Image: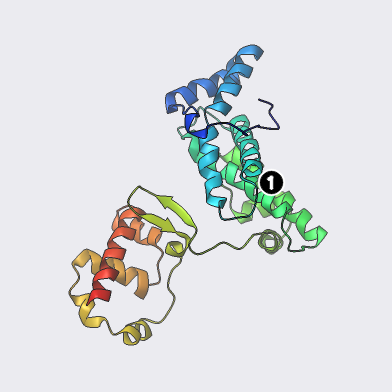
Amino acid sequence: MQYNKVEICGVNTSRLKVLSEDEKTKLLKTIRGGNEKEAKAARDKMINGNLRLVLSVIQRFQNRSENPDDLFQVGVIGLIKAIDHFNPDLNVRFSTYGVPMIIGEVRRYLRDNNSVRVSRSMRDTAYHAMQVKEKLTGELNREPTVEEIAKAMDVPKDTVVLALEAIVDPVSLYEPLFSDGNDTIYVMDQIGDVSDDRDWIDEISIRDTIKKLNPREKKIIGLRFFKGKTQMEVAEEIGISQAQVSRIEKSALKQIKGE
């Protein structure tokens, strides 16, 4: 395997090795503290052992016309960057840090190949912002805020926002974000409803039907559609997972539609 190019043609991806968290931690520490030969061997093993992570990430972009092999190779570059910048001494799973890095690398590649024309200066500002973001992510071990990026670049916050928005590709509301095996959470589930409470109830005439829901269902429906909160915000307020909120919400809406 070469570090800047990964050949996957003819490879049976179902046979790719998956490392345990303990194995990843040991390899990462060897990469940081071993001799040159040990570090190189550990790095190769770490890359090979996380190729299925790359595969799972690029599946999010399967509806695009891009060549999957190209996306996979770009994703591995993001994986390598994550391995080189990750701090194994912090109590964080590698995938928590690696997945955003892989996604960022793929999106950067897609932006470079985007047919929508963006001015050179705007594109340069956006790329600089992404480089600063990547650097700050490694230093802070979390995703930096727009304010932190703007401060590091010494430019106004609005400039950073406009530049990044100019090169962002449209995302489908039905793009899957997470699945626990039973329910899938889509982009649209992360968006709050800002319509007026009275208009919403009057429009679909469900006031009596909502009264038949159990207390938890009522609360979730109320927070989601009356207060305009996202599923993540509802989950934090109630104290359950977003997947549970999604499941209860769908069940309640199904009951309402049935009535």
Q: Which residue is mark 1?
A: 132
Q: Pointer 1: residues within 10 angstroms few (<14), some, or many (20+)?
A: some
Q: Quadrant of residue 257?
A: bottom left
Question: Is any part of residue 40 visible from this angle?
Answer: yes
| Residue at screen point 63% across, 32% down | 80
| Residue at screen point 58% across, 53% down | 145
Image coordinates of residue 8 in percent, x first then y, are: 62, 33
Q: Quadrant of the C terminus?
A: bottom left
Does 210 sit left or right of 119 as displayed?
left
| Residue at screen point 59% across, 42% down | 102
Image coordinates of residue 171 in percent, x first then y, are: 57, 61
Instruction: Give whichever of 241, 80 is nearer the camera.
Output: 80
Q: Amino acid at mark 1?
A: Val
Q: Quadrant of residue 192?
A: bottom left
Does 232 sit left or right of 164 as displayed?
left
| Residue at screen point 77% across, 62% down | 118
Asked if residue 195 is positioned above or below residue 216 in the image, the reply reads below
